[in-house]
Amino acid sequence: MKHPTLRLQYNAPVTLSLFFLSLFVLFLDRLTGGWTTLHLFSVYRSSWAAPLFYVRLFGHVLGHAGREHFINNMLLLLVVGPPLEEKYGSRTLLGGILCTAAISGLLQCLLFPGTALLDASGIVFMLIMLSSLAGMRSGSLPLTLILVAMLYLGQQVYAIFFVQDQVANFMHIVGGLCGTAFGFMVRKQ
């Protein structure tokens, strides 16, 4: 009797690549004493003529403030990302991630010029809102979308006004809005 062999499968290329790139950036951060994260993987207002501005505009989603921050984001990414990548396809999901990175990066530069933004939280919340649209039928609004939006937006708005921390709650909301808009756009196509 022949036993089946198990092979390791790179089952969600966009999700896994985002994970491994973020892990690599975390190692670079440790090796360089934070220099790479500050100069390459955080977005902040700078000259639009500087080539590194565009690296940071998209690369900020790879930077994290530390191991715990990385783990919290990546756990959610690895749970939510693969089923969405299977449903919508790798290319479509990558488009949503890049759009969310660019929108959150540009808004950070325009609205919060004195601070830097880094991490994949906006991407994770984009994926969470996108997943709440799963199973949406024509002419209907999923109750899961409404409940997730109420709980998520309520928590983020509360944190903006009543919690003093270094969390970019506004950019979490932006990520959630991007995921909702992206879900409706993909649905129409």
Image (spheres, rainbow, N blue to C red):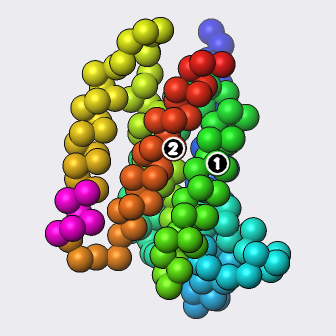
When the figure is inspected, residue 3 is found, relative to residue 50, above or below; the finding is above
Please state the total of marks drawn on the protein image: 2
Q: Is residue 29 left or right of residue 71?
A: right
By secondary structure, the bulk of the magenta-drawn segment is best described as helix
In the rendering, at what x and y percent does residue 73 appear? 44, 56
Q: In which quarter of the image is the N terminus?
A: top right
In the rendering, at what x and y percent does residue 153 appear? 29, 48
Q: Which numbered circle lies on residue 178?
A: 2
Q: In which quarter of the image is the C terminus?
A: top right
Label 1 residue SS: helix
Closer to the camera, 73 or 189? 189
When the figure is inspected, residue 12 is found, relative to residue 140, above or below; the finding is below
Residue indicated by mark 1: 99
Q: In this view, does 106 lie to the left or right of 120?
A: right
Task: Give yes or no for contact between labels 1 and 2 (Cβ–Cβ under 8 Å).
Answer: yes
Q: What stretch is highlighted in magenta?
A: 157-162
Mark 2 packing: few (<14 Cα in 10 Å), some, or many (20+)?
A: many
The amino acid type, in three-letter code, at marker 1 is Cys
